[in-house]
Image: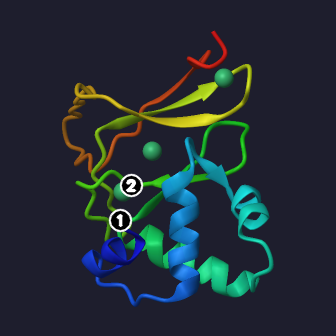
Amino acid sequence: MEEQLLREKKLRVTPFRKKVLSIFLRAENTLSLQDVEDKIGKHDRITLYRTLKAFTENGILHEIVMPGDVKKIALCPPVCKGGDGHHNHDHIHFKCKKCNEVFCIEQSHVPKIEVKGFKIETIEVQAQGICENCI
Ligand SMILES: [Zn+2]
Ligand SMILES: [Zn+2]
Ligand SMILES: [Zn+2]
């Protein structure tokens, strides 16, 4: 699974990259850098940063910044091509006010917004409320 995904994105396969990817594949919601560092055990920070950067640039991972929260990282949906920081996502980001977790939620109707004179490339929808685990 990890190896296939890396090959699809034309990234070099290394044991460390596979390990980082497996953390995200197993995660149920988005992870902070701290979460990743805790899960991965002993590691070289620079290598981790570089790995995350390569994954983010190639449509494997995307970053989510919710107001007043630390940056979160999550897997991209398979349709995402990534590259040049352009991500193609049809999902929204949801932050639970109770458990503070941030989720990527697949949504078939993300509203399309057009603004005259501006070329919108990506729209990110952020929602807050109570997640299904906390209701
Ligand atoms: Zn993406
Ligand atoms: Zn919750
Ligand atoms: Zn997301």
Q: Looking at the rendering, which quadrant does residue 45 occupy?
A: bottom right
Apparent side of residue 126 relative to residue 88 in the rendered image (left or right): right
Q: Look at 77% across and 59% down and name the residue there.
A: 34
Front residue (pair 92, 30): 30
Q: Is mark 1 within 8 Å of ligand 1?
A: yes
The spot of residue 94 in percent (x, y) is 53, 29
Which of the marked residues, 2 or 1, is nearer the chain's N terminus? 1
Assign the N terminus to one quadrant of the image: bottom left
Q: Mark 1 points at which residue?
A: 59
- Number of residues whose C-alpha sits closer than 10 Å to that of mark 1, classed few (under 14), some (14–19) or many (20 or more): many
Three-letter residue code for mark 2: Cys
Q: What residue type is labelled 1?
A: Gly
Q: Mark 2 points at which residue?
A: 76
* Residue 98 at x, y percent in the picture: 74, 20
For the residue pair 40 and 111, the one nearer the viewer reads as 40
Is the distance from the Cβ of mark 2 to the nearest ligand 1 atom less than 8 Å? yes
- Near mark 2 (Cα within 10 A), the count class, few <14, some 14-19 or many ≥20, is many
Q: Locate the C terminus and report the quarter of the image it occupies.
A: top right
Q: Residue at x 26, y 26 (%)?
A: 111
Residue 16 placement, left or right of 10: right
